[in-house]
Structures are given as C-alpha cells and as structure tokens.
Image: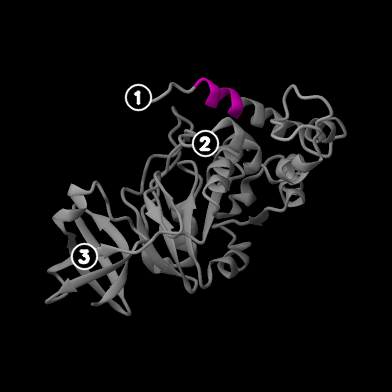
Amino acid sequence: MPEGKIIKALSGFYYVLDGENIIQCRGRGVFRKRNITPLVGDYVEYEAENDKEGYVLSIGERKNDLVRPPVANIDQAVLVFSAMEPAFSTMLLDRFLVLIESKHIEPVICLTKMDLADDLKKLNAFIADYRKIGYTVVETSSETMAGLNSLEDYLTGKTSVFAGQSGVGKSSLLNAIRPDLALKTDEISSSLGRGKHTTRHVELIPAAGGLVADTPGFSSLEFDGIDVEDVSSCFPEMAELSSSCKFRGCIHINEPKCAVKQAVEKEEIPSYRYDHYLQFIEEIKERKPRY
C-alpha cells in the first residue's frame, strides 16, 4: 500500500506527497463515522488509480498535533513576532509558548521587522531574557534580509509550523525565503492595529530543505486542555526550580519556601514572566467546565 504525507487539506480534499508526486485524495467514510479528521502533516496510507482520484485509507500514529492551526507531526514551531507593527508583546508570546510547550514541540522565536524597531534597548533586553531561559531567538528583517540565513538553518530537515499574530510578517518571511511563492500579504489595519488574515488554509510548503506550514493568523489563544498544575511545566525556568520548592506539587503562588517566588524576588526570573504565569493560572481557574 503506498504511503505519503498530507501537505494540504482544502475543500474536502487531501493532497498527499509521496516522493515527488502529489496525489489528490478524499477521506474514506470510516473517518467520519469514527469522528477522525485527517490533518496536514499526517502520515497516511492511500490508494489511487491516478493522481486526481485517490482515497486516504489509514492515518499513522501522531507524535503531536495542534488544533489551531490544525496540523500534526510538527518538529518545531517558529513563533513569529514583529518588533513593530504590531508592537512586540511578551504576554502574547508567553501564551504561544505555553501552548507549544504543552504539546512538547520545540519553539523557535523569530522576530521580524527588526529594521523598524524604535526601542532597540528595551527589545534587546527582552531577547536576552528569553535566550537566558534557553529559547532560540532569531532576529530577522524581510526588507534587509538580515537573519534569514540563520532562520533557514533551523528549517533544514524539519517540519515547522509558522505561527503568530496576524500582520507580523509570516507570509513576507516565507516570500523572502522562497520568492517564487508570492504569498499574499496585507497591510496592518489602522483601526484594529493588526493585520488582515491573508492565509486561508494550512499547507506544508517545501522551504530551506524542510517543510513549513504557513498557517492562518490569529490573535488569541485559549488554554483548553491545560490544567493549573500543568502551567509551571510550560515555563522552563520554573520547571527547573520546582524540585527545590519545599512542597511537592507547589504551584508557586501562596506556598512558603517556594524556589520560584524566591527566584522572582532575586530577579533571576523576569517579573513579567511570573505575572503572566499568574494571569494564565487565573484564566484557567475561571474557565467554564465542559459538560
């Protein structure tokens, strides 16, 4: 039975990459009966008499998957944030990081529009904070082409998802890496302060020796499936210190002799990271239970 990888899902069709061939397939009815939806990134078995009339027969086990964007078997998430237009937000970045960390996907922080930054000192301080935690941060500009070679090195041989707020320059970045793509980009909406949604579906695009998912932009994330007890493990600097807390299962809020709170007081953990942690905890506590 031939095998391949779904690289695009659109209007009920699944486009399966097998070697250098792309086969247009439909899903078997058995998937609907089992409430299973094939995702971009899935490894599948299929049958086809030609490259236009195939059927996906089975889906391989997934090592991970995301709901928004709907994509599976990701090696790393490139979290694209702009230095300006829209302004860099540590709160939004930390929301993305918590979601990605909860899925055990390696994050790469990519800053775009570095040529537009109006407060480099402040931005560089944030960059230093995230690098100290252990995150990879790549500084780029699609206008000057700065940093693109470094980003391409991270893409080689991997399946990556590009995700981030609308208008940060994901499509511009991919156009700079692969000019032949000519992906549509839009200006920032002056009334909303964010970009228009220019990507309408998820598709894996060959780029820099790997596959990249250009995904629909979105500006908010919900912590569905993440419990209060899970949040600290999604902050690497806190997870590292948890074993030094006096109480096992410490959630680093009211417990005495908490190593995380002590690190915050000593400014070893940025206070804004801890503030975001507390806000995320409250948000999860207030989440309405599902019945």
Instruction: Report if the CB atoms under discs 1 and 2 are less than 8 Å apart.
Output: no
Q: Earlier in the sequence, mark 3 or mark 1?
A: 3
Residue visible at 23% across and 77% down in the picture: 1
In the displayed structure, does residue 96 sit left or right of residue 214?
Answer: right
* Residue at disc 3, secondary structure: strand
Mark 3 is surrounded, within 10 Å at the Cα level, by few (under 14), some (14 to 19) or many (20 or more) other residues, namely: some
Q: What residue is disc 3 on?
A: 57
- Amino acid carrying label 2: it is Ile
* Residue picked out by circle 1: 291
The percent coordinates of residue 249 (x first, y second) are 69, 34
Crowding at mark 1 (Cα within 10 Å: few <14, some 14-19, many 20+):
few
Residue 220 visible (yes or no):
no
The answer to whether marks 2 and 3 mark residues whose Cβ atoms lie closer than 8 Å is no
On screen, 156 above or below 236?
below
Relative placement, left or right, of 108 versus 47 is: right
C-alpha distance separating marks 2 and 3: 32 Å
In the image, residue 94 sits, relative to residue 137, either above or below, namely: above
| Residue at figure coordinates x 83%, y 36% from the top left | 263
The relative height of residue 278 versus residue 230 in the rendered view (above or below) is above
Of the numbered discs in the image, which one, if any, rests on residue 226?
Answer: 2
Relative placement, left or right, of 123 versus 230 is right
Q: Residue furthest right?
A: 266
Is residue 284 found inside the magenta-colored segment of the image? yes
